[in-house]
Image: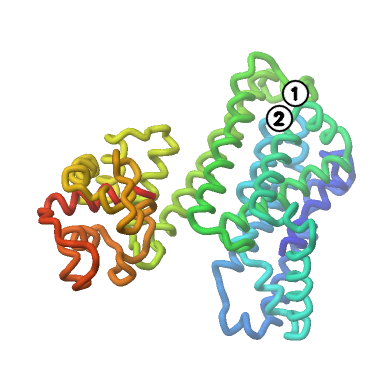
Amino acid sequence: MLAVTLAAGAPDAALAHGRAAAGPDGWLPISVLAFASICAICISARSLARDFNVRAVGACLAALAITGVSLSATFNRLSDALFSAHMTQHLTLMMVSAPLIILGKPNIIVMRALAPSRRRIWARIWRRARKAPFAALFISPLAIWLWFMGLFAFWHLPGPYAFALQHEEAHIAEHLTFLVSACAFWAVAFGELTRLSRGGRLMFVSTAALLSALPGALISIAPRPLYSVHAGATARYGLTPLEDQQIAGLVMWIPAGFIYLAAILGLLFLWLRHAEQGRGARGAALSAATCIVLLSGCNDEKALERAARAAGATGDPQKGAEAITKIGCGSCHLIPGIAGANGLVGPPLDHMGRRVYIAGLLRQTPENLARWVRDPQSIVPGNAMPNMGVSEEQARDIAAYLSTLQ
């Protein structure tokens, strides 16, 4: 599907923003051919017929249609005149077509259409490619993030942008690199390309959203036109070059931001729903809340308290830290954030909020952690930790503080 969709960009070369004779519907035959190819693949894939995914095939077809329209002659002529239309075209490829292509799982459709022997051949090729010496420069999450952000920034610099608009080959390369890098980006974001954790994917998309908003903001607030290549054409549409540029900046900034936000919320929802076994949704929520606190630049005790309460913790981390000091837990344990808590008798309690089990036996939840703090002998009789006479409220507070130790 990716190859077929990329082929839909071929009219862009022929049309060259209205310079060829293919006509406004020059992309339509390729779209029809691509549609027929997808249907043939679906029919010939017997295993797919037993497990037909309507949403995946629908996403493939939607990606094809949207890509075809965005690269049509009519839209090309408009984007030739208006910078804002050109930005809409670029963002459609990167933020709409690309994620739809990945959601369509074209690799599965194609692989299921192949004979088992051919599947094994392609699987071996892919495994060898991933182990190649320089593979990390192209398919690692960091490399894909850098390619995606770097190409986005490079092609929107005034010089490269004008060059691509004036030269057909460069313009084809611009669109291809946008679509390919965006497909790789969304493949990582949706967990289709690498084994990046859900938290890692959340950070992967969040940082891209944060940085990609910067060019749009700078373009929209620039005091003068930066893209002179459109200077002579905007008047036909009742716009000055600066107004056209401001609209383009807002297009890059706001609609793309909403798409990123939807992806971030979706990933956060999946992270909470499929939290690590043994921590449960509350532990994941606490991690997310703590992450938000750290990203916002707040690391004071009140911020930790708000994070714990937002995650559903019933105790007070501030009071928990005071109780730990008062009871003397630091004489046996190393506890981050507690003055003088550097004991070596018991295990260190750093990263306590990320642990799956307590004492290797009890699944970690705030309730179980409070129960262990209050009466460890009832859980593991004869263990080295004595009952310290901790009240129920103190136990909840101590558990709340230990849960902040990520």
Distance Cα–Cα, label 1 vs label 2: 8 Å
Query: Disc 1 or 2, which lies upstream in sequence?
Result: 2
What residue appears at the point 22 percent right and 40 percent down from the top-left corner? 318
Q: Nearer the viewer, residue 289 or 251?
A: 289
State if disc 2 and disc 1 touch (CB < 8 Å): yes
Q: Is residue 322 above or below residue 65?
A: above
Which quarter of the picture shows residue 271?
Answer: bottom left
User: Which residue occupies 59% across, 65% down?
Assistant: 58
Q: Which residue is mark 2?
A: 83
Residue lying at 33% horizontally and 41% vertically, measured from the top left = 337
Apparent side of residue 363 relative to residue 273 in the rendered image (left or right): left
Compared across the picture, whether 242 is left or right of 258 comes to right
- Picture residue at 24% right of the left edge, 60% below the top: 369
Is residue 238 at all visible to an observer of this figure?
A: yes
Mark 2 residue crowding within 10 angstroms, few (<14) / some (14–19) / many (20+): many
Element carrying mark 2: helix
Rendering quarter of residue 274? bottom left
Q: Amino acid at mark 2?
A: Phe
333 over 166 or under it: above or below: below
Residue 279 locus on image (x, y percent)? 34, 62
Residue 175 against residue 385 in the figure, above or below? above
Viewer-closest of 11 and 128 = 128
Q: Amino acid at mark 1?
A: Tyr
User: From this viewpoint, is residue 97 visible?
Assistant: no
Q: Secondary structure at mark 1?
A: loop
The numbered disc on residue 44 is: none
**Quick check: 54 above or below 98?**
below
| Marker disc for residue 227 | 1
Q: In x, y percent, where is residue 392?
A: 11, 55
